[in-house]
Image (cartoon, rainbow, N blue to C red):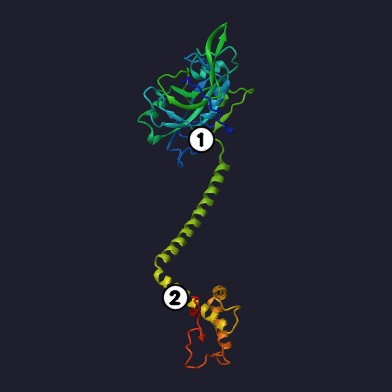
Amino acid sequence: MPAAAFNAEKCLLKLALAPNAEHDQFGMPSAAQLDLINHYTVREHTAEETYTRQMFLAHNALDRDKEIISDELIVQLATTLPGKGLFVKHPNSWDGDSGPGEGRFYQASIVEMSFDQARAALKSPDLKWADESQTAKLLQASFYMVKSAAPEGLIEKIDAGIAGDVSISFGYAESVPVIEDNKTTARRLLGPGEAYEGSLVWLGAQPGARITKNHSRDQFKNPDKKTEEFLMPDNTELLDSLKADKTALSNQVTSLTDQLSAVKSVFSDIENTDFAAIKALSEHGQKYNDSLVDDVVSARRQLGMIDGDDKDAVAAAKALYASFTIEQLISESKTLAKALGDGDSSGNASDDPNHQQDETGLRQKGATLTEYGVK
C-alpha cells in the first residue's frame, strides 16, 4: 500500500442502496449489473460481450505491512472505487505506468461480519484484528472486462483461481500507532482517503484479498448491521440538463449559421458592385444638387427675398437650401420661376428665346451667384 498522504477534500458521492445481484458462474452479468456497467461504457455493451466477477479487495484487519485500514477509511475507499480501473499490476510500480487497465470497477460495498466469518470468507485462518475492533469490515467490489479485449488466457486463469490475488492502491491522510500491551503493534491508516485502483498481483499486502466466487448476503447476514452499496451516482437529472443544453446550443449554432450565410451573401453582392460607377453617380448627383441650390438662391436674390445682398447673406441662404432634398429644391425652383414671370399660369416655361432654361425649369435672369463671388 502506498504511504503517500492524501490531503484533498473528500469527494462526496450519492449513495444508493441496490439489491444483491448474483454473479453468473460463467461471468456473464445480469441485467441489473449490465445497466451499471453501461454507465461507464462509450457505447452500450451486451451481456455476451462482457465478463464480470467480484473480489474482496480490502479489509480492516492487520495486513502484512503491519498496517490497519481504519473503519472510516475503508468506507471512503468503497465510495471512491466505482469507476476506477482494474490492472494486471499496479500502474505506479517501480517500472512506471503500465498503461490502461484491463477492467473497471462498477460496484463496491462494505460487508460487515464476525471475525470468524471473515477468516472463512478470506480463507485466512490466522487473520487478526486490533483489540478495539468490534467487527470485520470487508470491501467487496465488482469489476467488468471486455471478453474480446482481455489478455489471452486471463479470464480462464481468473476462473481457475490462478490469477486471483489482488491489491488496492489508495491515498490516506495520516497514520497513527496502534498501542496494545503498552507497545506499538501496528499503524492505523486514517482518512480522508480515496481508492486509486485495484490490481491483480502475485501477493497482496492484505491477506485474503482475492477474486472470489459469489457470496450471498445471507451467508454473512447480521440483523443488527446494514450493508451499503456504493454505486455510480444517479446523474439522470444532470444528463437531462446536459441534453437540454445541447439542444439549445444546437439551435444557436443553426441560427448563427443562417446569419453567417446571409452575411456572406451581402459580401458577395458587395464584391460584385461597381463602386466606381456608384462614386461617379454620387458625384454627379452632388453637382446637380449644388446647381439647384445656386439657382434657388439666385432667384430669391433677384426677387429681393434675401435679407441683404452681400457675400455673407448669400452664403447663409446657400447653407439653408443645402439642407433641402432634391425634390424640395426642384419644387422651390419652379415656384420662383413663376414669381419671376418666366412661366405661364400652368407652370410651363416661357418660350422666350433670350432666356436659357436648365433641366429644373428655372431660367437665369440678371446676375448669377458666381458674379458675386459665391461658388
Q: Can you give x and y, in whole percent of width and height, for residue 23 in the image? A: 49, 31
Q: Residue furthest front?
A: 310
Q: Can you give x and y, in whole percent of width and height, for residue 14 in the image? A: 58, 34
Which residue is denoted by mark 1 in the rendering?
A: 33
Compared to residue 200, the image places residue 338 above or below, namely: below
Compared to residue 327, the image places residue 106 above or below, namely: above
Q: Please name the amino acid that badge 2 sits on.
A: His
Most foreground residue, 225 or 339: 339
Mark 1–mark 2 Cα distance, whole angstroms, equals: 84 Å
Most foreground residue, 2 or 58: 2
Q: Is residue 60 shown to the viewer in this render?
A: no
Compared to residue 198, the image places residue 317 above or below, namely: below
* Marker disc for residue 160: none
Which residue is denoted by mark 2 in the rendering?
A: 284
SS at badge 2: helix
Most foreground residue, 214 or 252: 252
- From the viewer's perspective, tell me whether residue 90 is left or right of residue 111: left
